[in-house]
């Protein structure tokens, strides 16, 4: 009876069964299987942005004079955007561009799209207002670029902030291993890589099967390598295009 894989232990059992155990003795140690599973999950996280990771955000405070920030322990795969509060602005802030431009129409008269103040603001007027605010932001606010260094799990900000700022970092977070154990591609990748390793081990010595047969380590290795390549292609094909640009 097929079982749902819920832990590292049951994932190991699944791999051994797919390689022929317990009918034949699969000579792989638990530490080897654990490493295979860890690497397979890490590759799925990296190459599949639909199921291997998910969009999320982290609130971040940047300090004046500091350009690097640790994201260690946050399971971050990549950073897709950085949005900072670059000044006091808003429709309820006196004398701000947003307030001066929109307060009378939006708050006093209710002339916004879908509002109840008469016929409502025309969409052309709304679009022009939004474009104007974007131009104000582009000309008078400070723009920052962020780079995520996956090896050290640090976020680098350029240029170095001269004042303290608060905002949000929009990221791709890695899906947890436990949530990927039952993914068919992850399971196939684990079995293929275990087959490769087992075949490599068998090719170093002659192993006897019950009844007098022998293992063909080279053939097992080659089948595993072929299956691994096929699965990795599938993983990347099923991932949607990366839809972000850091800036």
Image (tube, grey):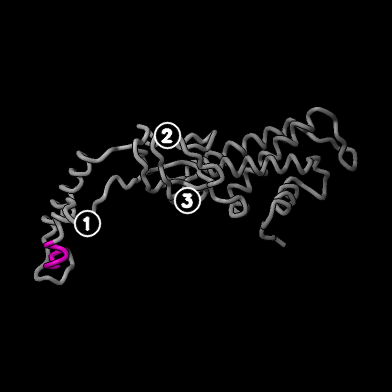
Asked whether 28 or 211 is in front, the reply is 28
Q: CA distance from mark 2 to mark 1?
A: 30 Å
Residue farthest along the top direction in this orientation: 204
- Residue 151 rendering spot, x and y as whole percentages: 54, 33
Asked whether 221 or 212 is in front, the reply is 221
What segment carries the magenta color? Answer: 104-112
Q: Callout 1: few (<14), some (14-19), or many (20+) C-alpha neighbours within 10 Å?
A: few
Residue at 17% x, 68% y: name it: 115
Residue 17 falls left or right of residue 111: right
Q: Callout 3: few (<14), some (14-19), or many (20+) C-alpha neighbours within 10 Å?
A: some
- Residue 77 rendering spot, x and y as whole percentages: 50, 42
Residue farthest along the left direction in this orientation: 118
User: Which quadrant of the figure has residue 203?
Assistant: top right
In the picture, the disc for residue 93 is 1
Vertically, is 110 above or below 58? Answer: below
Disc nearest the viewer among 3 and 2: 2
Residue at 56% x, 45% y: name it: 73
In the picture, the disc for residue 67 is 2
Q: CA distance from mark 3 to mark 2?
A: 26 Å
Q: Callout 2: few (<14), some (14-19), or many (20+) C-alpha neighbours within 10 Å?
A: some
Q: Earlier in the sequence, mark 1 or mark 3?
A: 3
Residue at 18% x, 44% y: name it: 136
In the picture, the disc for residue 54 is 3
Residue at 72% x, 54% y: name it: 10
Indicate the secondary structure of the residue bearing disc 2: loop
Indicate the secondary structure of the residue bearing disc 1: loop
């Amino acid at each position: 009876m097929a079982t749902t894989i819920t832990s590292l232990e049951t994932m190991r059992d699944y791999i051994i069964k797919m390689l022929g155990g317990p009918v034949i003795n699969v000579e792989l140690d638990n530490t080897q299987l654990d490493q295979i599973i860890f690497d397979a999950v890490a590759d799925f996280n990296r190459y599949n942005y639909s199921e291997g990771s998910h969009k999320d955000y982290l609130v971040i405070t940047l300090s004046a004079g500091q350009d690097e920030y640790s994201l260690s322990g946050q399971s971050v795969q990549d950073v897709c955007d950085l949005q900072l509060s670059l000044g006091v602005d808003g429709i309820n802030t006196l004398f701000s561009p947003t307030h001066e431009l929109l307060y009378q129409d939006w708050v006093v008269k209710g002339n916004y799209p879908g509002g109840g103040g008469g016929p409502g603001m025309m969409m052309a007027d709304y679009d022009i207002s939004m474009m104007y605010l974007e131009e104000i932001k582009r000309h008078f606010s400070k723009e920052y670029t962020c780079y995520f260094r996956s090896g050290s799990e640090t976020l680098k900000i350029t240029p170095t902030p001269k004042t303290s700022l608060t905002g949000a970092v929009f990221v791709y977070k890695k899906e947890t291993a436990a949530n990927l154990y039952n993914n068919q591609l992850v399971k196939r990748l684990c079995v293929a890589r275990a087959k490769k390793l087992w075949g490599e081990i068998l090719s170093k010595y002659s192993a006897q099967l019950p009844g007098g047969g022998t293992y063909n380590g080279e053939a097992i290795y080659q089948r595993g390598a072929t299956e691994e390549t096929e699965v990795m292609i599938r993983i990347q094909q099923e991932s949607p295009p990366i839809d972000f640009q850091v800036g």
